[in-house]
Image (spheres, rainbow, N blue to C red):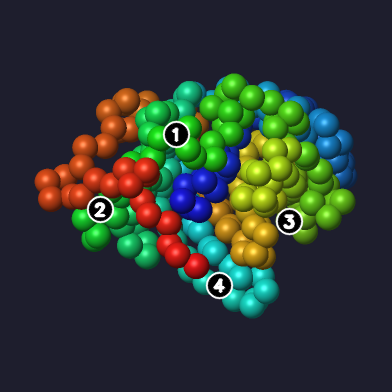
């Protein structure tokens, strides 16, 4: 479930840009303003409320920071519809789908001919991401390494769950936010084992038409459906 859980935390969040008049011809371009932490959080929070539907391509890397190497790579597409419908479709390294209608999560790998069904209440699914929560209430938020922006000029926000159990499971989430449009371009989640799950978004489309049927999953014939309560934990 590591992939879908990061995905649920990784929704790009749109903030309505503040308009400005262009500088006179020949005038020096002013340095971009650096906002305070509270200002960035407020823009991210307010702009998330403006999204009803969303689609994007993504590229993902799982890195071992302790070993200094990439463990795996993946790529695919995401669609999202408020309040809590989402589909992650992996095209590489192999076809894999994570689908939620807001009540359950389906985890389906066509090559395995198996589909896991997990009740949403059993998933790490923050209310902020379905428009019901408050970013500052759910997380401790700070600038990454105490710096507002990274070398590419993106705002970098570290999110640590306030809930202790989720803190131990999820670790730290870092959002890299574009200061031009306040879209989240990159998310990183670093767990307690120093594994970093990094997702970069591109070709974003905000508020496209998305039919509810896209978020329904009917297992194809021959696919074994496995319920979460039937999964036997591996023995140490």
Task: Give the residue drawn at x 71%, y 43%.
Answer: 164
- Expressed as whole percent of the image width and height from the top left, the position of residue 116 reads 32, 47
Task: Give the residue drawn at x 40%, y 35%.
Answer: 119
Label 2: how many residues lie within 10 Å, few (<14), some (14-19) or many (20+)? some
Pair 3/1: label in front: 1
Q: Earlier in the sequence, mark 1 or mark 4?
A: 4
Q: CA distance from mark 2 to mark 1?
A: 19 Å
The residue carrying mark 3 is 152
Q: CA distance from mark 3 to mark 2?
A: 42 Å
Label 3: how many residues lie within 10 Å, few (<14), some (14-19) or many (20+)? few
Q: Earlier in the sequence, mark 3 or mark 2?
A: 2
The residue carrying mark 1 is 120
Query: In the picture provided, is 167 more to the left or to the right than 103?
Result: right
Query: In the picture provided, is 231 more to the left or to the right than 112?
Result: right
SS class, disc 1: helix
Q: Is residue 207 above or below residue 26?
A: above
Q: Do the CB atoms of the residues marked 4 and 2 lie less than 8 Å apart? A: no
Q: Earlier in the sequence, mark 3 or mark 1?
A: 1
- Expressed as whole percent of the image width and height from the top left, the position of residue 185 reads 61, 47
The residue carrying mark 4 is 70
Q: Earlier in the sequence, mark 3 or mark 4?
A: 4
């Amino acid at each position: 479930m590591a992939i879908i859980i990061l995905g649920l935390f990784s929704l790009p969040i749109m903030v309505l840009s503040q308009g400005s008049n262009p500088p006179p011809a020949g005038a020096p371009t002013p340095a971009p303003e650096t906002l305070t932490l509270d200002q960035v959080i407020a823009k991210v929070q307010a702009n998330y409320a403006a999204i009803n539907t969303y689609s994007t391509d993504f590229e993902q890397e799982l890195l071992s920071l302790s070993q200094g190497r990439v463990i795996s790579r993946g790529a695919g597409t995401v669609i999202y519809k408020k309040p809590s419908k989402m589909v992650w479709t992996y095209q590489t390294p192999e076809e894999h789908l994570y689908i939620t209608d807001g009540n359950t999560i389906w985890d389906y790998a066509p090559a395995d001919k198996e589909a896991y069904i997990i009740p949403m209440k059993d998933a790490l699914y923050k209310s902020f991401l379905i428009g019901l929560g408050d970013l500052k209430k759910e997380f401790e938020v700070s600038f990454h390494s105490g710096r507002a922006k990274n070398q590419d000029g993106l705002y970098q926000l570290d999110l640590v769950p306030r809930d202790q159990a989720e803190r131990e499971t999820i670790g730290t989430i870092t959002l890299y936010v574009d200061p031009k449009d306040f879209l989240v371009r990159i998310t990183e989640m670093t767990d307690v084992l120093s594994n970093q799950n990094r997702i970069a978004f591109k070709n974003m489309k905000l508020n496209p038409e998305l039919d509810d049927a896209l978020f329904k999953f009917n297992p194809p014939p021959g696919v074994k459906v496995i319920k979460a309560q039937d999964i036997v934990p591996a023995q140490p």
